[in-house]
């Protein structure tokens, strides 16, 4: 848990990231998020510094020491670069292993996880190239993710379809149809015997087909 900072004093200035975020003695907790990054550092940047820079930028770090650091417990909330390994056959790159405390992430938010782990850290100047290779999400966090609101039985009850698999499709072309023609396509596939149709992942509320218009025409088709 975070600790009270007591009477710590603030000293302005720029420090090497490895002074704070490189912790080879750290043993990850069962509740930690663990991430493995493939890193190619900028020329002249030591591996430990590059790994620590990734840990900093994806958690509590910034380019300089700020007085507001004293308003929280950075030793608790920071990411910890705790190990590095060689990449076989690649002398430039290495694997950096970083642990993050679970409290850095909003419960049940995949968006928040991705924003932290694959956000602006990829534009960080200490590294020339960066790739997220693997993530371990702790069980304690997985339990905060609600999952689908309904199971298959609820869907069958709503559609009155039992005793066989349900068959659906994605409307194509995925982009460019007007709302009226989208509704027409939905009508045709349902009339042809499919159980359901769905939007492609690229479909939102673009100028050629606003979501409200799409909804109205699809409901008319149904």
Image: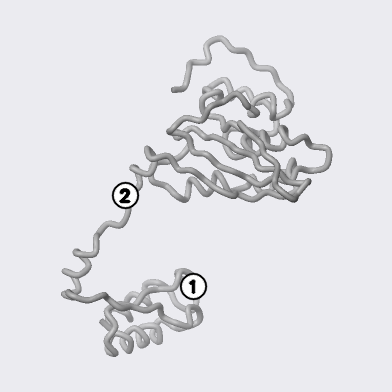
Q: Is residue 153 left or right of residue 178?
A: left
Residue in the image at 67% along x and 37% along y: 51
Q: Quadrant of residue 220?
A: bottom left
Q: Secondary structure beneath disc 1?
A: loop
Image quarter where the C terminus lies is bottom left
Q: Quadrant of residue 18?
A: top right
Residue in the image at 78% along x and 46% along y: 91
Q: Is residue 45 left or right of residue 186?
A: right
Task: Where is residue 101? Give x, y as percent.
Answer: 49, 32
Q: Which mark is residue 172?
A: none
Which residue is identified by label 2? 146
Q: Quadrant of residue 66?
A: top right
> How far is disc 1 from disc 2 in space, using C-alphas?
29 Å
Q: Which numbered mark, 1 or 2, is in the foreground of this view?
A: 2
Task: Where is residue 108? Give x, y as percent.
Answer: 38, 45
Q: Is residue 71 left or right of residue 83?
A: left
Which residue is identified by label 1? 206
Residue in the image at 51% along x and 25% along y: 76
Q: Residue furthest right?
A: 44
Residue in the image at 16% along x and 69% along y: 157
Q: Residue furthest front?
A: 88
């Amino acid at each position: 848990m975070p600790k009270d900072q007591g009477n710590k004093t603030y000293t302005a200035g720029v420090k090497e990231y490895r002074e704070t975020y490189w912790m080879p003695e750290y043993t990850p907790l069962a509740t930690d998020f663990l991430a493995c990054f493939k890193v190619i550092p900028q020329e002249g940047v030591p591996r430990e510094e590059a790994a620590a820079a990734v840990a900093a930028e994806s958690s509590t770090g910034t380019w300089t020491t700020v007085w507001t650091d004293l308003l929280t417990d950075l030793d608790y909330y920071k990411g910890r670069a705790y190990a590095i390994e060689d990449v076989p056959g690649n002398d430039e790159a290495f694997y950096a292993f970083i642990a993050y405390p679970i409290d850095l992430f909003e419960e049940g938010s995949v968006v928040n996880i991705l924003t932290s782990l694959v956000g602006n850290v990829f534009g960080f100047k200490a590294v020339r190239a960066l790739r997220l290779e693997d993530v371990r999400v702790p069980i304690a966090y997985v339990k905060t993710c609600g999952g689908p609101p309904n199971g298959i039985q609820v869907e069958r009850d709503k559609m009155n379809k039992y005793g066989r698999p349900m068959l659906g499709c994605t409307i194509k072309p995925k982009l460019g149809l007007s709302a009226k023609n989208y509704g027409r396509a939905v009508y045709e596939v349902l009339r042809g015997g499919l159980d359901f149709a769905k939007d492609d992942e690229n479909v939102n509320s673009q100028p050629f087909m606003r979501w409200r218009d799409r909804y109205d025409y699809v409901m008319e088709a149904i």
